[in-house]
Amino acid sequence: MSEPIISLDVKREQRVPPRQALTRKWPVLHYGPTPTFDRTRWTFHVFGLVAKPWQCGYDEFINLPHKQLLADMHCVTRWSKLDNTWEGVGTRELIAKVELLPQAKFVMVHCEHGFTTNLPLDDFLGEDCLFAWRHNGQDLEPDHGYPLRLVVPRLYAWKSAKWVRGIELMEADRAGFWESWEHGGYHMRGDPWREERFR
Ligand SMILES: Nc1nc2c(c(=O)[nH]1)N[C@H]1C(S)=C(S)[C@@H](COP(=O)(O)O)O[C@H]1N2
Ligand SMILES: [Mo]
C-alpha cells in the first residue's frame, strides 16, 4: 500500500482549533443504539444525481483500492483527538464508480437507523476523506463505526458518520440529523477552524 495521506490539519503549527481541548482517550459519541452487522446482507448505495445508481456488498466495497490517512478528529462538544491513522477506501475512489451529474453539489450520507449528515461535495471529495473500517492498525470497534464509517477530518466529527450504508448526491443542500432544527441545528458545513458549530 502507498504512503499514508497526511491531512492538511496535521501539518498546521497550531493543531487544536479554537475552544477545543485535547483528549487521549477516544470517547464514543452517537445518537441511538449501536447497530448489528450482517455481512451477507449489508449493501452500499450511491444514488441521487448520478447517471446510474450504483450498489455493492461489503466484500466488494472493502476490496476497492485502499488508502491510509493520518488525521486529527474534532468533536463539536469540544474534544479533539490527534494523530489517528485510518485505513479504508477514498471517497474519490468510490465516486469514480459512478458518473456524477453536473448539478451534484452536496452529499447526504445515509447510515443505519436513519441517521444522516449533509456536507458539500467539495468537502466530501477532499484527498483526506475516506470510508474506513480500520483505526490505528486495528478493526474499528462497533461503537466507533464498524463495519464502515466516513472520515472527513477537516470538518467537525459529526460529519464523520458511523455505520454508513450509502450516499445521495444532491443539487441543493438539505439538513441531516444533527443539522436539523429538531436535533440542535448544527452547522451545514462545520469547519472547526471557523467554529461553524451551529447554523
Ligand atoms: N451514525 C452516526 N454517526 C455519528 C454520530 C451519530 O450520532 N450517528 N455522531 C457523530 C459525532 S457527534 C461524533 S463526535 C463522532 C464520534 O465518533 P466516535 O464515537 O468514534 O468518537 O461520530 C459521529 N458519527
Ligand atoms: Mo461530535
Image (cartoon, rainbow, N blue to C red):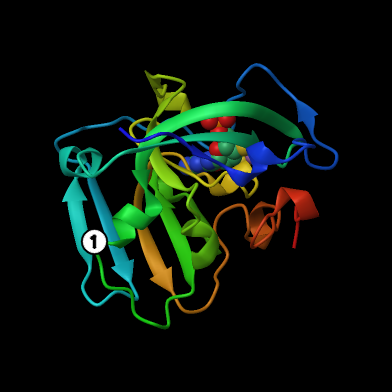
Splitting the image into 4 quarters, where does residue 16 fall? top right
Which residue is depicted at the point 70% across and 31% down?
A: 80
Q: Quadrant of the C terminus?
A: bottom right
Residue placed under numbered mark 1 in the picture: 97
From the viewer's side, name the closer residue of 39 and 123.
123
Instruction: From the viewer's perspective, tell me whether residue 182 is left or right of residue 118.
Output: right
Q: Quadrant of the N terminus?
A: top left
Which residue is depicted at the point 78% across and 41% down?
A: 17
Splitting the image into 4 quarters, where does residue 164 fall? top left
Splitting the image into 4 quarters, where does residue 163 fall? top left
Which residue is depicted at the point 47% across and 52% down?
A: 127
From the viewer's side, name the closer residue of 160 and 127.
127
Q: Where is residue 143 drawn, in percent x and y? A: 46, 26
In terms of image quarters, where does ligand 1 lie?
A: top right
Instruction: From the viewer's perspective, tell me whether residue 84 is left or right of residue 111.
Output: right
Give the SS element for disc 1. loop
Q: Is residue 162 above or below residue 123?
A: above
Residue lying furthest right:
19
Q: Where is residue 180 drawn, in percent x and y? A: 63, 60
Neighbour tally class for label 1: few under 14, some 14-19, many 20 plus, Cα within 10 Å: few
Q: Where is residue 160 drawn, in percent x and y? A: 52, 44
- Type of amino acid under label 1: Lys
Specify whether residue 175 is in view. yes
**Callout count:** 1
Which residue is depicted at the point 22% across and 68% down?
A: 53
Q: Is residue 65 above or below residue 170?
A: above
From the viewer's side, name the closer residue of 129 and 174.
129
Residue lying furthest bottom:
103
Q: Is residue 198 above or below residue 112?
A: below
Specify whether residue 118 is in view. no
